[in-house]
Amino acid sequence: MSVAYLFPGQGSQKPGMLHDLPKHPIITEKFEEASVVLGEDVLALDTSEALSSTRAVQLSLLIHEVAAASLLMSEGATADIVAGHSIGAFAAAVVSGSLRFSDAVAVVELRGRLMQEAYPSGFGMGVIIGLDESRVTLLTDGINTQNTPVFIANLNAQDQITIAGTISAIEQVFTLARSAGAHKTKLLDISVPSHCRLLRSVSDEITRKMKSFILKDSNTLYIGNCRARVLRKAEEIREDLSEGVANPVRWHEATTLMFERGARLFVELGPGDTLTNLAKKAFPDTRCISAVSSGFDSARLLINREREMSNNR
């Protein structure tokens, strides 16, 4: 049995998410390190007002997730395999031992700022529940034009697909999706058309930034966003992080691979429980918890207990 750490992406943020973490030297150390890199107090990033910006959201998530994972790991509750959804991939890369935290902060600041500037209005993302990838692809292909761009962005579950593009194009796809039998369609609180070719220029800038960093081969299994496969080599992880913003997140395939590699305890290291709920639905025989919701002491005890049981099998 393996322990898997899951790091969520944009949409899981909550006001006060940094302040709500335990008062612990490990947490404080991460806050201070990030503040030095940014030249600002990171505790100002998680207010309701600040979180209206993509930059603040992405930085808050990265810092929260790395700090939370660092706290658990400092107490021996380590992971065997890690994966991050969208911006969560940077936290996963840090925890895997491949990317330095300070470098992650620097590139995520750039990523969030460029995404925010690329499409200031009229664009976004939406989710369709009840149709599979092939059906949604047909719908987006039917609407997608130069004036109404819309693409598949995230494959969160077999029947939960996120699309990105102009709001008008997304709403047109929603109308077709409901007619085709979708159970639910919903616009997400995300103002950027992430994970599609509309962000190719942003991906190119991230690629240039990532080339200035020294990455290491991971010491923990890292599952990539773009191709949903195990990545160990530094250059593979660099490419995955650089290209992720302009390519769909194949999340269901990523977590399925984690399950196939032995993951039986999924621990979400973020302010919500979105990935926990997806894992519970996909793998009902596994244990899935949110460290924040369950409490860090409970999460640590459960991780260590599961590891002891695995060692005794």
Image: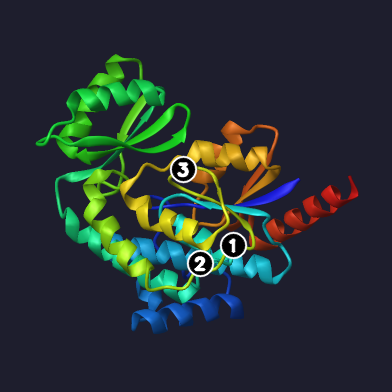
Q: Is residue 206 above or below residue 101?
A: above
Question: The N terminus appears in which quarter of the rendering?
Answer: top right
Viewport quadrant of the C terminus: top right
As drawn, which residue projects farthest toward the right?
A: 312
Viewer-side residue, 302 vs 173: 173
As drawn, the label of residue 218 is 1
- Work out how far the residue at label 3 is from the one at label 1, CA to CA, in angstroms: 17 Å
Q: Relative to the observer, which residue lies in front, 88 or 97? A: 97
- Category of crowding for the residue at label 3, using alpha-carbon neighbours closer than 10 angstroms: few (below 14), some (14–19), many (at least 20): some
Q: Residue at x 43, y 61 (%)?
A: 61
Tell which circle, 2 or 3, labels the residue nearer the N-terminal end: 2
Residue 13 shows up from this direction? no
User: In terms of sequence position, does the residue under pointer 1 or pointer 2 come before the other?
Assistant: 2
Say which amino acid is labelled 2.
Answer: Asp
Asked whether the beta carbons under mark 2 and mark 3 sit within 8 Å of each other, the answer is no
Relative image position of residue 45 (x, y in whole percent): 35, 70
- Badge nearest the viewer, 1 or 2: 1
Where 93 falls versus 71 (above or below)? above
Q: Position of residue 257 (x, y in %)?
A: 60, 39
Tell me the mark number nearer the camera, choosing from 2 and 3: 3
Looking at the image, tell me whether mark 3 or mark 1 is earlier in sequence order.
1
Expressed as whole percent of the image width and height from the top left, the position of residue 219 reads 64, 63
Query: Separation of disc 2 and disc 3 at Cα?
Result: 34 Å
How many marks on residues? 3
Name the mark on residue 227: 3
